[in-house]
């Protein structure tokens, strides 16, 4: 049974930073690509970033390139999303997920960017 604890959301002013994390158990974390998604009301959930098993490959949505960094610690079964230079349009609920792993969505954490 997959378990995940997601943390790190909050409210910040434009230009601020936040770091999200998801700690997993219940599957072989190091064997799976990990990803972060976000969703705003009325819109589909969108992929923000993903990272391969050993961090050799990362991909980002164009809207966050150069500002967000995804990373992972396979020893701690944890994936991170460092978000810098936050903009109001980054406001959303953020979810971690292991594509290919059933029921691996995090519970979601609210990120609000507002002055």
Image: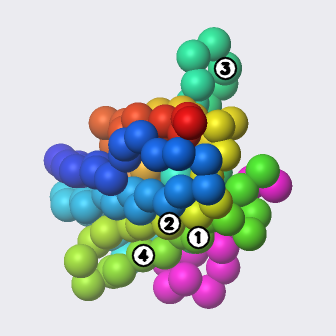
The residue that mark 3 highlights is: 43
State the separation of the CA atoms marked 4 and 2: 11 Å
Label placed on residue 95: none
Q: Residue at x 46, y 46 (%)?
A: 12
Q: Which tag, 2 or 3, sits closer to the chain's start? A: 3
The residue that mark 2 highlights is: 82
Secondary structure of the residue carrying tag 4 is strand
Q: Residues within 10 Å of mark 4 (few under 14, many from 20)?
A: many
**Which residue is outermost to the front?**
115
Q: Residue at x 81, y 55 (%)?
A: 62
Q: Residue at x 34, y 60 (%)?
A: 21
**Which residue is outermost to the right?**
62
Question: Could you tell me residue 14's position as x and y percent?
Answer: 61, 47
C-beta proximity under 8 Å, tags 2 and 3 = no
Q: Nearer the viewer, residue 59 or 62?
A: 62
Secondary structure of the residue carrying tag 3 is loop
The residue that mark 1 highlights is: 69
State the separation of the CA atoms marked 1 and 3: 23 Å
Q: Residues within 10 Å of mark 1 (few under 14, many from 20)?
A: many
Magenta-colored segment: predominant secondary structure: loop
């Amino acid at each position: 049974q997959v378990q995940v604890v997601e943390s790190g959301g909050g409210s910040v002013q434009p230009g601020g930073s936040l770091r999200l994390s998801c700690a997993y158990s219940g599957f072989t974390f190091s064997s799976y690509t990990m990803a972060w998604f976000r969703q705003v009301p009325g819109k589909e959930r969108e992929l923000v970033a993903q990272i391969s098993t050993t961090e050799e490959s990362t991909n980002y949505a164009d809207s966050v390139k150069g500002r967000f960094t995804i990373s992972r610690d396979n020893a701690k079964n944890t994936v991170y999303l460092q978000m810098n230079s936050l903009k109001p349009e980054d406001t959303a609920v953020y979810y971690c997920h292991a594509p290919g792993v059933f029921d691996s969505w995090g519970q979601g954490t609210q990120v609000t960017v507002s002055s």
